[in-house]
Image (cartoon, grey):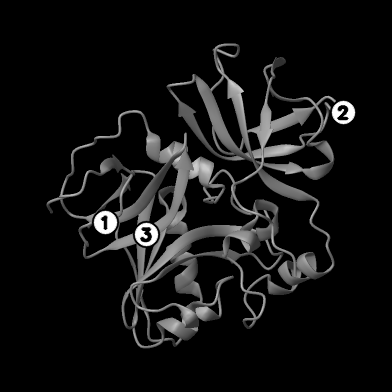
Amino acid sequence: MTNTNTSLISPLPDWNLIRISGPDCVPFLQNLLTNNIVNLQVDQQQLSGFCSPKGRLLASFWISHPQIDSYDLWISADIAQEFAKKLAMYRLRSKVIIELKALEFNIYGLMSETPFIDQTPIQCDLPSVILNNTEYQRRLIATSEVMVNSDPQDLWKLLEVQSGISRITDATKDRFVPQMINFESVGAVDFKKGCYPGQEIVARSQYLGTVKRRLKIASINIKKNQDLIISPGMEVFSEADPDQACGVVVLSSFDHTNSRYYFQLEIKLSQTQEKLYFKIDNLQYSDIVLLEPPYPLITI
């Protein structure tokens, strides 16, 4: 595949692809996912999730619709196989084929300061992200080819964090009701569609206003915290309640230019004004700064 655009290319070994195809794939997915698959047109994409009966996200993924009766789920690699097996449990008599494409395709992320020129057979366009006054277009692609990495500074990961759109990994599955990571505000939940696992709890959380935790963008200076490596699932504490974690890291990235970690932090709203820190082996890593995600929270 020839890339004639001035795109940066980032290999994404932490992503995978699950293909759902067959004449029953629309009702099959519609009965399971937080978003409305019926309204997704060919060549469009959307964010969605799959919840436990308790309304906690077991997986999140971008869904692309390359052709009729075929959907691609772009998902974290560390939960892809488990989630594909879980989908198979719901198949019953549905005429669907569930394929994990781990051995067939490599996943890459493309970033460009201008609109993409080329189209690829298997792609999924993500929302653009503004970083340092530059707007980057983003695209996921799957290909059997090996492409040269032109993103040595991991700009893709930094853009993903700054987007404020979370991706569930093995370290964070079964921890969040969708609203805790702002999924209703980034178009990943349809409150007017039919039932799906955990739907009653998700709807109750929205309409009763019981969401007391939200996703923020956070950063910490590594020059002052040289030994700190931040990864999904790590807990954050506040001086107001040092014995109980008030937040969880969802995604993280390192900004080499500014020597700062940026990370998505799911946190108790009551603790956002407190001094926050990581606590590892009785050591505190402080100076965490919180920022709002780049979108408003919706109300219903």
- The numbered mark at residue 59 is none
- Whether the residues at callouts 3 and 1 have beta carbons within 8 Å, the answer is no
Percent coordinates x, y for residue 44 in the rendering: 38, 71
Residue 41 or 32: which is nearer the viewer? 41
Residue at 65% over, 52% down: 181
Q: Is residue 226 left or right of residue 155?
A: right
Disc 3 to disc 2, how far (Cα)?
42 Å
On screen, 282 above or below 97? above
- Cβ atoms at labels 2 and 1 below 8 Å apart: no
Residue occupied by mark 3: 125
Farthest residue in the right direction?
A: 240
Q: Quadrant of residue 62?
A: bottom left
Instruction: Identify which amino acid the numbered label 3 is placed on.
Output: Asp
Of callouts 3 and 1, the N-terminal one: 3
Q: Is residue 134 something one can see in this rendering? A: yes
Residue with the mark numbered 2: 240
Foreground tag (3 vs 2): 3
Q: Amino acid at mark 1?
A: Ala
Q: Is there any visible trace of residue 230 in the rendered image?
A: no
Distance between the alpha carbons at the discs numbered 2 and 1? 46 Å
Q: Residue at label 1?
A: 142
